[in-house]
Amino acid sequence: MKSNNFFSLFNIISLFLISLCACNSTKEKFQENKPLNIIYIMADDHAYQAISAYESEISKLAPTPNIDRIAKEGARMDAVYCTNSICGPSRSSILTGKFSHVNGFYKNVDGGDFNGEQLTFPKVFQKNGYQTAVIGKWHLGTKPTGFDYSKVLINQGGQGTYFNPQFCINGKDTVTETKLHLTKVIENDCLDWLSNRDTTKPFMLLYQFKAPHRDWRPDSMYHDLFNNFDFPLPETFNDNYEGRIAASENMMEIGRHLNRRDMKQIPPKGLSRRDSLRWLAYGDKGQYWSPNDTLKGDALKYWKFQTYIKDYLRCVAGVDRAVGSVLDYLDENGLSENTIVVYTSDQGFYLGEHGWFDKRWMYEESFKMPFLIKNPRVIKAGTTSDAMLMNVDFAPTLLDMAGIEIPGEMQGKSFKEVFGGNQKNKRKSVYYHYYEYPIWHKVQPHYGVKTNRYKLMYFYYTMDEWELYDLKTDPNEMNNIYSDAPQDLIDSLKKELEALRKEYKDDDSLEQMRRMTDTVIKRVYNEPNKIMK
């Protein structure tokens, strides 16, 4: 009798364990079959050097632990490049998967507004049953299309302001935030949207910050951060631009072109609003100024660098906190295993390298973008990759990972297969073209090609200058070897460059390209008392 009871109990336990395994298997299969959610996080002007996952000296002193979580749980991409290193054109290329000269938004200034009627990856997700939203910085002028919900910055020409920012909701209602710092507002809005979304649908959210864009005004909670030490100067901080004519004509030097507003100076009492604004902008065009009579020369340049870099990194700290809030939400709501998370910036940025702030150049610091991505179904935790990619590849990749067909008109390519155990570089080169001149920083229009080892650039607007760098022996791009390089090397790089220009439909004549730079199409978005079209 006892024996029969034993076997009965054994059978019951066995059946329970089999049932439990079957349930777990069914649950895992259900999770694998569920559509993947997408959270695409993008800051503005966030240099890869300022993300501690990239292990720069600056980032070791100003870590970004929450952003790093994406790399630890997914991948850090080490060779992602912007096709046109300026805010609006990069955003338009990311949305459309097409180069800026093809999607029509190739300049921030006098280039018109984004054509929202064209195909974008949010529209494709929306058509495939996703609930879509964009919150934060948009900076493209026209009303966001392809989104079930939009709340985007509209003041200061779409740049927004760190304090008292104005938003347009769904292209109609305008609201002003009067209490919180902009980064916190965007953080709260995204968490609210996630908490109130339609949970019967997969979601695709663009979570986009103004920070750490100029003029680098951090939340008051970070005002004392980094006060007890100074940051080291970059190796190329005192670059004299020898052998690089285009670089020598720049207007983005920390020592000469940061203005009083950047340095948080307070205008004298009694000035009119117009005169106060002029006083604050003093320095933009290289005018000499100092906060006092004794701070001069190298000491003045050093002070400007420390003031700039600390405020910049304080803004980054706010973004890192906001990223952590959303990652925590995913964890707490059982969404982490079923959500692709991307962290990137609209381009790279200079943190004192070559003595600069800002971007625009094809030199590495502004050309290279940070890109971290987490997708538990495809990407092994802690992956690093040196596959060369471009920002036009983001849209095809997200669609491919979600199992959605990539539209044929997109010029970018999916890099999903990079994570399938095949780290082989799909591209042997990447292409770049910058058009805007002279505003804001007098960066000469140029185009170029980068391979694994070499970078060739051509500056064509008011000059006829080639630059060539061996990135293996000269990673800081200090020595232009174009006049000394073997002719067969130059010929092979020019051949590759022309092939890319043809492939990407950017093979106009120099006269036509100069005309693109000179073209003036006023932006409705920048005009006062105008609501988004």
Image (cartoon, rainbow, N blue to C red):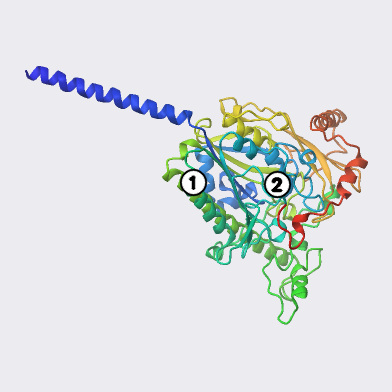
> Disc 1 vs disc 2: which is toward the camera?
1
Within-10-Å neighbours for mark 2: few <14, some 14–19, many 20+: many
In the shown orientation, is residue 23 left or right of residue 355? Answer: left
Most distant residue in the bottom direction = 270
Q: Where, by quadrant of the figure, is residue 480 drawn?
A: top right
Local secondary structure at mark 2:
helix
Q: Nearer the viewer, residue 68 or 206?
A: 206
Rendered-image quadrant of the N terminus: top left
Q: Sort mark 1 into few (<14), some (14-19) or many (20+) by Cα contacts within 10 Å.
A: some
Identify residue type, mark 2.
Glu
Where is residue 194 shown, x and y percent of the image? 50, 47
Local SS, label 1: helix
Measured as percent of width and height from the top left, residue 147 is found at 61, 44
Please tell me which of labels 1 and 2 falls first in the chain: 1
Q: Is residue 405 visible?
A: yes
Location of residue 463 with respect to 178 vertically, above or below? above
- The residue under label 1 is 327
Q: Which residue is mark 2?
A: 365
Horizontally, residue 379 falls left or right of residue 268, namely left
The amino acid marked with disc number 1 is Leu
Q: Residue furthest left?
A: 1
- Between marks 1 and 2, how big is the CA–CA gap? 28 Å
Residue 81 can be seen in this image: no
Q: Which mark is residue 510?
A: none
State the residue lying farthest toward the right. 511
- Observer-nearest residue: 352 or 172? 172
